[in-house]
Image (tube, rainbow, N blue to C red):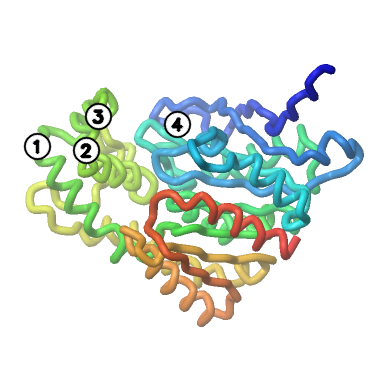
Amino acid sequence: MPAAPLRTHYRQLVVESPSLHNNLLGDPARRLLPVYVPPQYDSEPERRFPVVYYLAGYAGWGGQKLGEKSWEEPLHAALDRLIAAGTLPPMLVAFPDGFTKLGGAQYRNSPVCGNYLDYLCNDLVGAVDCELRTVAHRAARGVMGKSSGGYGAILAGAERPDVFGHVCSIAGDSAFDLSYRMDLGKCFQVLRRYTQPIDFVEQFIAKAARSSQEFSAMMVIAYAQAYSPNPSVPGILCDLPFDMQTGDLRPEVWQRWLDCDPVRFAPTRATALKSLKTLFLDAGTSDEWCLDIGHRILADRLQKAGVPCALEEFEGGHMGHDERILVSLQKIAANL
């Protein structure tokens, strides 16, 4: 008796993104976009499905979530199981590639990295709606992510509520005064060993192994390309938020970063955020960047601005906890 054919859990789209063309980093504008499809996608060929976009954190990309790990249930198996149990409705889950030469662009539009918010909201959503059977409406479309991906989800909800009706952030970057300041010091300590910051960047990319301090330094430079881009700065194409001689903050540059902080900008987008069907914040109570506190502050400021949101905390730190992806998907599912 022949074995039953294995189900194809993912469709692999290839998206040519006008929003990323001619970016100054030379990163590709053509990206792969894997999309999970439920069993009903093939068994019910006339049916259309809601879509949730999962945004990876800094130095990651969505496709990394598709692999299998020892002693862990694969994500596609967990989705199949929850859909079969009726805990989730049949839905598509897309996994964008937001990686840049320096590790990520915070899903912002940048004259240096490219327009990653437009890439997400226009190019990827347009491609998925064109090539797959979706319910092409904001009420059936969500965006979620972790860390920098959580930041990107909040940003997309605030700036493009016409595209997304559901937003979930797992330990999304927030409260920059609290969460980023230590990494600025680590970045200064690393960069002072080099003649120019670009020398560090080039050596970091070429290395086989990198220290945690070097990772922090690269992360800060990548964030600067998103928050304080400056194409006229040789090499790194951005303004760093600290003085290269003393390590002291540069107030005018740091203010540009603060203007990008969700605890600052989200309350000013109250009308957009009030229109969301789901706004869910989630973080571990031992988060190494104190993003649980960042989410508490953000939730408080949103509520004071009249924006309803749900906040949950779980035991644990920043790393791992892929099971919280399923929690966010269930929050979205409850409002689809």
Q: Residue at x 53, y 27 (%)?
A: 29
In front: label 1 or label 2 = 2
Q: Residue at x 59, y 59 (%)?
A: 327
Q: Is residue 17 left or right of residue 109?
A: right
The amino acid type found where label 3 is placed reads: Ala
Residues marked 4 and 3 touching at CB (< 8 Å): no
Tell me the quadrant of the picture where the C terminus can be found: bottom right
Instruction: Give the CA separation, mark 2 to mark 3.
Output: 7 Å
Q: Is residue 19 left or right of residue 147?
A: right
Instruction: Give the CA separation, mark 3 to mark 1.
Output: 18 Å
Residue annotated with mark 1: 193
Which mark is first along the chain, 3 or 4? 4
Residue annotated with mark 3: 209
Instruction: Give the CA separation, mark 2 to mark 4.
Output: 28 Å
Residue annotated with mark 2: 211
The amino acid type found where label 2 is placed reads: Ser
Which mark is first along the chain, 1 or 3? 1
Instruction: Give the CA separation, mark 4 to mark 3.
Output: 27 Å
| Viewer-proximal residue among 254 and 199 | 199
The amino acid type found where label 1 is placed reads: Arg
Q: Residues within 10 Å of mark 3 (few under 14, many from 20)?
A: few
In front: label 3 or label 1 = 3
In front: label 2 or label 4 = 2
Q: Secondary structure at mark 2?
A: loop
Q: Secondary structure at mark 4?
A: loop
Which mark is first along the chain, 4 or 2? 4
